[in-house]
C-alpha cells in the first residue's frame, strides 16, 4: 500500500515532473502539483503527470480572491477531478464555501499559515497571537465553511478543534538532518505522524535526491514503520 505522502513536483519543466511522477508513483499515495507547474503546463500538464505517476492529484493552487473569482477558478479545474485543491483560509468563510460549492467531489483544503512564515512575519502582516493560535482559528473557519481537509503544520492542536473526519495534511515535512530551505516551521515525518497527520507533503528531500524513486521508497518504508506503531 502506498505511503500517505504527497510528493511536491515543483519541477523546472514538464518532462522532469513526469519523470519524477513515474519514479515516485509506486511508493506514495499522492502527486502534488503547485503553481509553478500548473501555470506553465496547464491542464494538459496535470493530465500528463497523473498518467505518468498513476496517483491522485493534489492541486496546490492556494486560491485566494473574492468568492466569485474563486468559484470560477474552482470550476475551471473541476474537469481534472483533483483529490485535493487548496484555498487560503485567510480568504474567509464565503470564499471557502464558493470553492466547496464548485468542487463537491474534491477535498477542498484550507491552508492555514504558510510554513515559510515565522512569528515575526505574521506580526508584520497584522496577524495577532502565536502561529498556533492563528492556525487553529483558520482551521476552524475553513472546516465550518465546508472544507474537508486542512493544511496546518501544528497538527496535534488542530485535530482537537476539527474532529477525526477532517483530513489533516502536514506541509514542510523534512526528514531528520535535511536542509529546511525556505521553511520556518518544519516537522519530521515521525513527528507529523505521531501528532496525527493523515498526509505528509514532502518535496525537495525526494525530488532533489540523486535517485527520487529510491528516496521515495526509503521514506515510504520509514512512514510505514512509524504507522505500524501508532
Image: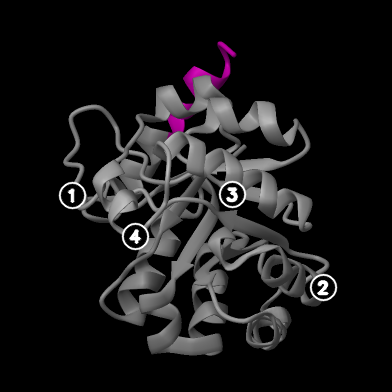
In the image, residue 61 above or below residue 31: below
Residue that carries the numbered disc 1 in the rendered image: 181
Q: Which quarter of the image is occupied by the N terminus?
A: top right
Q: Quadrant of residue 16?
A: bottom left
Which element type, helix, strand or loop, lies under badge 3?
helix
Q: Main secondary structure of the magenta part?
A: helix
Which element type, helix, strand or loop, lies under badge 2?
helix
What is the span of residues highlighted in magenta in the rendered image? 220-230
Q: Position of residue 81 (x, y in %)?
A: 71, 73
Dot 2 or dot 3: first in sequence order is 2
Residue that carries the numbered disc 3 in the rendered image: 138
In the figure, is residue 142 to the left or right of 217? right
Judged from this view, the residue extending furthest toward the top is 229
- Residue 49 visible at all: yes
- Determine whether label 4 and label 1 are within 8 Å by CB: no
In the figure, is residue 82 to the left or right of 203? right
Which of 40 and 47 lies nearest the eye of the viewer? 40
Which of 88 and 61 lies nearest the eye of the viewer? 88
Which residue occupies 41% across, 39% down? Answer: 131
| Residue 142 inside the magenta-drawn segment | no
**How far apart are the two marked residues, 2 and 3, measured between alpha carbons?**
19 Å
Q: Position of residue 55 (x, y in %)?
A: 59, 59
Amino acid at each position: 500500500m502506498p505511503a500517505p505522502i504527497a510528493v511536491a513536483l515543483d519541477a523546472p519543466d514538464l518532462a522532469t515532473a513526469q519523470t519524477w511522477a513515474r519514479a515516485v508513483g509506486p511508493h506514495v499515495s499522492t502527486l502534488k502539483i503547485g503553481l509553478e507547474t500548473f501555470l506553465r503546463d496547464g491542464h494538459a500538464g496535470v493530465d500528463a503527470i497523473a498518467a505518468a505517476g498513476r496517483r491522485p492529484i493534489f492541486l496546490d493552487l492556494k486560491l485566494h480572491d473574492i468568492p466569485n473569482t474563486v468559484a470560477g477558478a474552482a470550476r475551471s479545474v473541476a474537469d481534472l477531478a483533483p483529490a485535493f485543491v487548496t484555498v487560503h483560509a485567510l480568504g474567509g468563510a464565503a470564499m471557502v464555501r464558493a470553492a466547496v460549492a464548485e468542487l463537491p467531489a474534491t477535498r477542498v483544503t484550507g491552508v492555514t499559515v504558510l510554513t515559510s512564515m515565522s512569528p515575526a512575519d505574521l506580526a508584520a502582516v497584522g496577524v495577532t497571537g502565536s502561529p498556533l493560535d492563528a492556525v487553529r482559528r483558520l482551521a476552524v473557519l475553513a472546516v465550518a465553511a465546508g472544507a474537508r481537509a486542512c493544511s496546518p503544520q501544528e497538527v496535534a492542536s488542530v485535530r482537537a478543534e476539527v474532529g477525526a473526519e477532517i483530513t489533516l495534511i502536514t506541509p514542510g515535512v523534512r526528514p531528520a538532518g535535511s536542509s529546511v530551505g525556505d521553511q520556518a516551521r518544519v516537522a519530521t515525518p515521525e513527528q507529523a505522524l505521531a501528532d496525527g497527520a493523515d498526509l505528509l507533503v514532502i518535496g525537495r528531500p525526494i525530488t532533489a535526491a540523486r535517485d527520487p524513486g529510491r528516496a521515495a521508497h526509503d521514506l515510504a518504508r520509514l512512514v510505514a514503520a512509524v504507522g505500524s506503531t501508532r
